[in-house]
Amino acid sequence: MRYWLFPLTAIALWAGNVVVSKMASGVISPLAITFYRPVLAVFLMSFFLAIPTWRNRALVRRNWPKLMFLGFLSMAFYQCLSYWAADTSTATNMAIITALTPLLTMLVSSLVLREFPTSGMVLGGAIALWGTAFLISGGSPADLFKGHYRIGDLLMLVAALSYAFYSVLLRKWPLGLPAWQSTYLQALSAMIFMFPLWLTVPAGQASLDTSTLPLIFYAGIMASIVLPCLWIKGIEHLGPNRCSIFMNALPVITAGLAIILLHEQLAWYHLIGGSVALLGVFIAQTLRIRIWQRETE
């Protein structure tokens, strides 16, 4: 029973990372913090992963292009978009959109892995789409056609979609590496991708001082090392499907932290749009009746 603490604590740390992303807005460049984050994570993980990973160098060499792309999707592209989204989106909106990731993963999986969609995916997807539109339009979905939306909300939606592709590719590409070594190499790949972009950041937007170091430490240690460890442990004991349900708690925890730490106001459209979107995700996760079957089944 205590195993549920693993994914729940991981989601709490994820909520903290959303708040940290919002705190970083205007303090440090998204490109800079996206680079510093894997630098710190790689430095710390190297103490216990460099030698075991070197012993698997033949396997790493064969899978290096895939590891590079996975690292780009999850630790470079996704993270950079989320930091940019924080410039114009709220932490609550970002968390609700992020909570759509399990649904987006199922939809991408049906396309990439040719898995048949379920009735829950179709019904839940339609409900979640309406809830998300209601949320990002501030309660007036029709206004989206007039261009009334926050660019940050759309960036966060693209970020969630990129993470969904990442999750599906992890299943499509069995790398044969232990999970921690794979995470370590993906962080290294993200660092390589972000390095030339970091060089373009003005010095004043990439400074390491008392205002930026706590944010970098949280992102590089708690969100990049501790969070994956807890999530992996949760999957080991509970399985991926049961763990993904905990994603529904992300907006609730984030909203609480945002109200306390960021003084954000919880609007009526957050409650309605967020609740409807999460209901759609829950239906997609639990209603698994296939719309059609293979003829051989």
Image (spheres, rainbow, N blue to C red):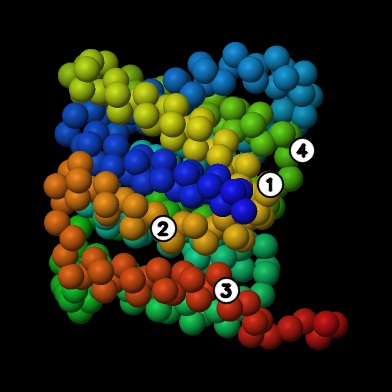
Q: Position of residue 196 (x, y in %)?
A: 39, 23
Q: Position of residue 243 (x, y in %)?
A: 57, 55
Q: Gap between marks 4 and 1, in whole Å?
A: 16 Å
Residue annotated with mark 2: 249
Instruction: Judge from the rendering whether residue 268 lies leftward or rightward of residue 128; answer left or right.
Output: left
Dot 1, how many residues are within 10 Å of its Cα: few (below 14), some (14-19), or many (20+)?
few
Q: Which mark is nearer the camera, 2 or 4?
A: 2
Residue annotated with mark 4: 176
Residue annotated with mark 1: 236
Dot 2, how many residues are within 10 Å of its Cα: few (below 14), some (14-19), or many (20+)?
some
Can residue 209 be seen here?
Answer: yes
Amino acid type, callout 2: Ala
Q: Position of residue 88 (x, y in %)?
A: 19, 49
Using the image as rendered, state which of residue 35 and residue 64 is in the foreground. 35
Dot 4, how many residues are within 10 Å of its Cα: few (below 14), some (14-19), or many (20+)?
few
Report the residue that reaches farthest toward the right: 296
Residue annotated with mark 3: 286
